[in-house]
Image (cartoon, rainbow, N blue to C red):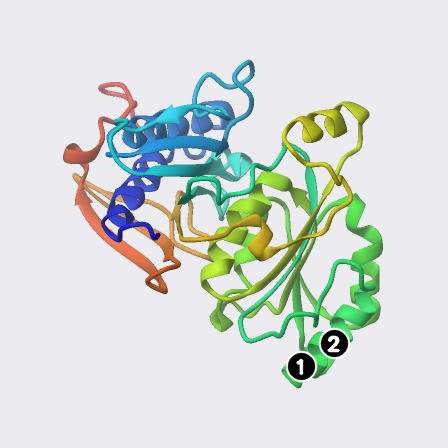
Amino acid sequence: MSIDKKFIDHFIKVTTKAALASSFLVGKKDKIACDKAATDAMRSELNRIAMNGKIVIGEGELDDAPMLHIGELLGTKKGPFFDIAVDPLEGTNFAANNLPGALSVIAISEKNNLFNAPETYMDKIAVGKNIPKGVIDLDYSIKKNIENLSDIKNKNPEDLRACILDRPRHKKKIEELNDLKVKLKLITDGDISGALLVCEEKYNIDIFLGIGGGPEGVLAASALDTYDCQFQGRFIFKEKKDIIRAKKMGISDVDKKYDLNEIVSGDSIFCATGITHGDLVKGIEINDNNFISETLVTHKSSNFKKIIRQENRLDLWFQSPIKNGEKEN
C-alpha cells in the first residue's frame, strides 16, 4: 500500500494555511497567540481532507490541548486511514520575536506506521544520504562518530560541520567537538529543521546530534527516511511518571535505541512550510493581496523531495486576524 500522490497538495495546503495564519502575528511577542493561530488553521484544513486521520503526535494530551491532541480524529471520515504527527509552529520564540527558522510541520503515514512518541526528550544522531549503516551510532563516543564519518566522507575532522542545540546539557559534547576541531552550527531552537540540514549537501551540515524533543525526532525522521539518511533516537525519561506513561503507550524497553525504520515505516508524506525565513525554507512573504510560501515536501513511495514555492491570492486563502485600521508591525 502507498499514499496517493493527490494527498501531497492537500497537506501542503495544511502547513501553508497554518504558516500564513501565524505569520500575521510574527514579531508581536506573543508566542501563545502565534501557536494558537497555526494550530486552529491546521486543524480546520485537516478536517476538509477526505481521510480518516488520527493524531499520534500533537499538541499534547486531551486535558492539555483541546486542538490537535493525541488521539484526535480528523478528516471527513471518508477515505484512507492515516496516522498524523503535527507541530503547527516549530519555533514559537522565533515567530514571536521575528527570528529566523519558524516552521509549520506535518508528517503523515499509513495507519500504525508512525511511532507514537511520548512528550519527553530524545537523544538523536543523524547523517546524510550515502552513509552506510553502522558508521554513526548513539552508543559510540563523539570521537568515534566523527572519526568514522571523517573516513567515509574522505574529509578531515576540521572540515566536518556539526549541528547541535546550544544548551547547557550539551556542554561536554560541544567541548569534545571543539577538541576535534569540528566546525559547529549552534542552534537555539528548532531541532526538526536542525536534523533536516543533513539531508542535502547545499546545507553544508555533515552530522546532527544531541538531545531534543522526542516528537520532533519522529517528525524529522519521516523526512530523513525519504532522503535515505541515517537516524537514531533514544528516549530520555527523567521522572518515574514519564516511564509509567511510556509503558502505557506500549514502550516496554525505555532504554531502547531506535533506528529510522523503527520510527517510521511504510509510505509517508512530510511538509514543512516556512513562517519566518530560515536555513531550510523561506518564510511567508505578503505583498498587497498576494502571498508567497515555501514548503519542503517529501513523499517516500514516489521518491518525491522538493521545495515548493507558491504564490496565491491572500483573500482566497485567509482572513487576517488584524483588525480593521490596525497596522502590522
Residue with the mark numbered 2: 148
Rendered image: mark on residue 152: 1
Residues at marks 1 and 2, CA–CA distance in whole angstroms: 6 Å
Residue type (three-letter) at the residue carrying disc 1: Ile
Amino acid identity at mark 2: Asn
Give me the residue at 18% from left, 45% from top: 312
Mark 1 touching mark 2, by CB under 8 A?
A: yes
Spot occupied by residue 303 in the image (x, y as percentages of width and height)? 36, 65
Number of residues whose C-alpha sits closer than 10 Å to that of mark 1, classed few (under 14), some (14–19) or many (20 or more): few
Quick check: can you spot residue 329? Answer: no
Which part of the image, by quadrant, shows the C terminus?
Answer: top left
- Seen at 22% across and 49% down, the residue is 6
Q: Quadrant of residue 250?
A: top right
**Residue 186 — which label?**
none
Residue 210: horizontal and vertical position, in percent? 71, 52
Horizontal arrangement in the rendering, residue 195 relative to residue 245 (left or right)? left
Q: How many marks?
A: 2
Answer whether residue 75 is visible to the viewer in this image: yes
Residue 141 position within the rendered picture, expressed as x and y whole percent measured from the top left: 83, 64
Please tell me in which quadrant of the rendered image residue 60 appears. top right
Establish if 149 lies above or below 86.
below
| Residue drawn 80% across the image and 59% down it | 139
